Amino acid sequence: MKNIIKLIGIVLTISMLTACQGHTGETGTRDTSEFATAETTVAEESTSHLQETAEATTAESESPTPSCADLSGLAKSYTELPDYEKGEDTWRPLDLRQKDLSAVDLSGDLDRLLHAEFDMGTIWPDTLTEGFDPQTVMTIARTPGLDIASLHAEGITGAGVGIAIIDTPLLVEHSEYKDRIKYYEELSLDKYGSYQADMHGAFMTSIAVGKDCGIASGADVYFISANVWNEDNSNLSWLTYAKAVDRVIELNASLSDADKIRVISISAAWQPGDAGYEELEASIKRATDAGIFVVTCNTFIDSGYTFCFQGLDRSPMDDKDAAESYSVVDWTQWLSMQREGFASYYSEEFAAHTPEEILLVPMDSLLSAEPTGPDDYIFNRVGGWSAAEPFIAGLYALACQVRPDMTPEVFWEAALSTGDSKKIDIDGNQYNGKMVDPVALIDSLA
């Protein structure tokens, strides 16, 4: 299949944005005043290196960008909260997206509410239980956290640094990140049928570069949408992801030294025996050899058992900037978030190659763009492994801005040496965790 190219800013129009209004489902009109932005048009991009890339690339046809996601199927009215039993899968949140809770008595439901995900389509009752307020939850989450905002105030935003994200179809005109999208390409348009934007791509992009939520709010994004299934959608395959990594390498060769893509974020996991495993591993090695840091769920293994990370949880009402708000995600829970085959593979590799230290990064209680509309947001109670990669990629972009000769090895060593110690218990054994301290990290590199 020939590459289908879409250069953001050249063909996006106001009509695309106005046609993609926030979905209200069947539950009534949502209040978007708190999170809506005054900006309603897409800024035109006229960067010369993008024009050169377009001229150098042969496209079979112009790719349409994805339409807004339709979550009307989630709409439902409750008279009481559904049962939520905490068990082995405690990481699974209570899904309140698009739900009408106006008739629900929420008193006594604090535990369930503190483990719920919801969006701007959720309708709440007039009286809320003490200790939980959805507006406060979203306001707290609408920051990068860990005092990263202070770095942004100093101009350390990842400006001039390129981040490539390989993920699911993106709502490119969302106000949270639209001004950061320099390039969008779809490698598997025919795989998605109606071609709606997907939740995952919007979530990852918000973490990496969101104007309010993002770590590197000034970095440039080169987004490639790729499918993880084979030609007939019957089996998992990483061939398209391999093509996407190679495409990033190709794009990078056309960019000036000042605009290079320095990191690729892939929130996915693969293992030997998967279709396309060898091809993707070979593509990642080519990217690494080209000086691009590739951050994936497999990073610990692909880096020669050097770059090991694990997630941090935060209760929704706790201060996102305060280090004491975060706790290490239990190892069993951490593994349960992956498909069974990869979890076993990863656990075996971890046991055989025990790391000296594990970098701990936030992954839960995060606000992100929701692909239902250009100003819609969702509170993600659990981000899982997927949320760690764009966080690390964004932090690497900040490091590259303050030190252009940055390497993954220098970055990781600095992140560990400046991190706050937290012990990790794994099967009765104690491991050294280092909770990332972005301000101390960047100060050590500047």
Image: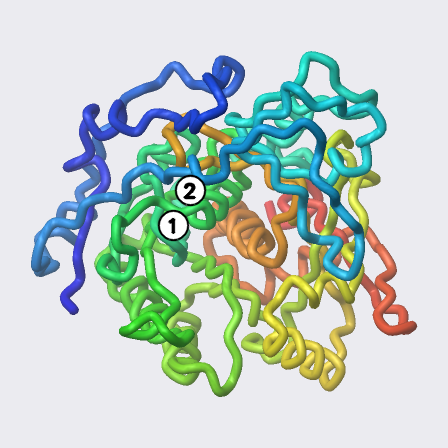
Secondary structure of the residue carrying numbered label 2: loop
Taking the spot 56% from the left edge, 66% from the top edge, the residue there is 297
Q: Can you tell which quarter of the image residue 70 is in?
A: top left
Taking the spot 70% from the left edge, 23% from the top edge, the residue there is 104
Picture layout, residue 348 above or below residue 309: below
The C terminus lies in quadrant: top right
Q: Which residue is mark 1?
A: 162
Q: Residue 411 in the image: x percent, y percent?
A: 60, 59
Left or right side of 391 for 353: right
The N terminus lies in quadrant: bottom left
Q: Residue 205 in the image: x percent, y percent?
A: 45, 45
Front residue of 420/239: it is 239
Image disc number at residue 219: 2
Q: Mark 2, residues whose alpha carbon is within 10 Å: few (<14), some, or many (≥20)?
A: many
- Sequence order check, earlier mark of 2 and 1: 1
Secondary structure of the residue carrying numbered label 1: strand
Taking the spot 46% from the left edge, 36% from the top edge, the residue there is 370
Q: Can you tell which quarter of the image residue 443 is in?
A: top right
Left or right side of 127 for 149: left
Q: Mark 1, residues whose alpha carbon is within 10 Å: few (<14), some, or many (≥20)?
A: many
Q: Amino acid at mark 1?
A: Gly
Front residue of 110/394: it is 110
Q: Are marks 2 and 1 in contact (CB under 8 Å)?
A: yes
Distance of label 2 from label 1 (alpha carbons): 6 Å
Picture layout, residue 164 above or below residue 322: below
Taking the spot 48% from the left edge, 87% from the top edge, the residue there is 273
Whether residue 181 appears in this view of the structure is yes
